[in-house]
Image (cartoon, coloured by chain):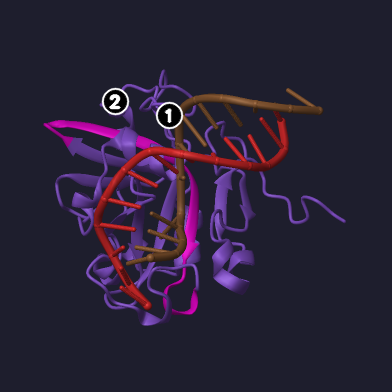
Chain colours: A purple, B red, C brown
DNA sequence: CACATGATCGCCT
DNA sequence: GGCGATCATGTGG
């Protein structure tokens, strides 16, 4: 049977509320810190993109840290360098975007300094008020809704004019931790508690992952 | 609700 | 040549 494309309209890009533009912008040093800390601090931040003169954005509610050469789940495991992953070795604050399963994109924010190869995967976000609740609930959906593709791999989030990250202000969200999703091939690293999500968000990609879902 | 399946292609071995 | 840092749909309980 022929498969229907997504039921969401293909070109929806989330318009950023003008009031959120008053938040403070993350500078280079924010991204150069410890990758796991950055992954935590990205919960509640707004990723914004300028497209044809207007700003669009979403509030990040779920992330995963990928720890480079020591992390069997990371594309840079063992210090591997290929053309695809080269942006992951850029200075903190750049985008690393790749295609999975031949049809979905995954967006990451590079952390630490040039040559290290660590990053944070953006797994889910909430659109501005009025957007469908689960429009950005998953890494592929997030990229689709914001119009992010592999062509954006290597883009700079700091002072580029086309991208911006606004840090959360005010109340701290309740942040929960779990193992990462979809990395069962990664040996011991599959258990590492490197997934962070806003407990109260309706837009997280999956509910809490149980450690022992099916005891014998 | 909980699975199971197929789509689809760039990348790396 | 094999396989994903996924998702939408379909089945059955």
Quarter where residue A68 is shown: bottom left
Of all chains, the one bearing label 2 is A
Q: Quadrant of residue C7?
A: top left
Q: Residue furthest right?
A: A216
Circle 1 sits on which residue? A135
Q: Quadrant of the N terminus of chain A?
A: top left
Residues tagged 2 and 1 counted as in contact (Cβ below 8 A)? yes
- Identity of the residue drawn at 26% across and 32% down: A56
Vertical comparison of A26 with A87: above or below: above
Closer to the camera, A65 or A175?
Answer: A65
Q: Position of residue A95 (x, y in %)?
A: 28, 56
Q: Chain of mark 1?
A: A
- Count of numbered labels shown in the rendering: 2
Q: Residue at x 29, y 26 (%)?
A: A10
In the displayed image of the protein, which residue is found farthest to the left?
A52
Q: The magenta stretch spans which residues?
A: A51-71
Spatial CA distance of label 2 from label 1 is 9 Å
In the rendered image, which residue does mark 2 sit on? A12
Residue at horizontal 27%, vertical 43%? A148
Q: Position of residue A214 (x, y in %)?
A: 80, 51
Q: x and y percent of residue A63 in the render?
A: 48, 51
Within 10 Å of the Cα at label 2, are there few (<14), some (14-19), or many (20+) other Cα atoms? few
User: Which disc, if any, is residue A17?
Assistant: none
Residues B1 and A195: in front is: B1
The answer to whether residue A23 shows anywhere in this view is no
SS at circle 1:
loop
Asked if the magenta segment contains residue A97, the reply would be no
A108 relative to A56 in the view: left or right? right
The secondary structure that most of the magenta stretch takes on is: strand
Question: Is residue A207 toward the left or the right of residue A151 in the image?
Answer: right
Occupied quadrant, residue A126: top left
């Amino acid at each position: 049977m022929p498969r229907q494309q997504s039921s969401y309209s293909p070109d929806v890009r989330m318009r950023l509320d003008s009031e959120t533009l008053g938040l403070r912008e993350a500078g280079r040093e924010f991204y150069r810190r410890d990758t796991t800390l950055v992954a935590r601090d990205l919960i509640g931040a707004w990723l914004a993109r300028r497209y044809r003169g207007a700003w669009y954005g979403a509030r990040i509610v779920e992330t995963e840290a990928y720890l480079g050469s020591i992390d069997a789940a990371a594309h840079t495991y063992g210090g591997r360098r290929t053309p695809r992953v080269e942006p992951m070795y850029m200075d903190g604050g750049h985008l690393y975007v790749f295609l999975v399963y031949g049809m979905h994109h995954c967006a990451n924010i590079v952390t630490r300094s040039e040559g290290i190869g660590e990053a944070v995967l953006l797994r889910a976000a909430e659109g501005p008020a009025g957007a469908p609740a689960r429009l950005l609930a998953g890494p592929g959906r997030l990229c689709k809704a914001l119009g992010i593709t592999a062509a954006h791999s290597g883009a700079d989030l700091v002072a580029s004019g086309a991208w911006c990250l606004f840090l959360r202000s005010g109340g701290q969200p309740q942040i929960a931790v779990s193992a990462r999703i979809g990395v069962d091939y990664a040996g011991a690293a599959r258990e590492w508690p490197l997934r962070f999500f806003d407990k109260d968000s309706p837009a997280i990609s999956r509910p809490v992952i149980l450690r022992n879902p099916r005891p014998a």
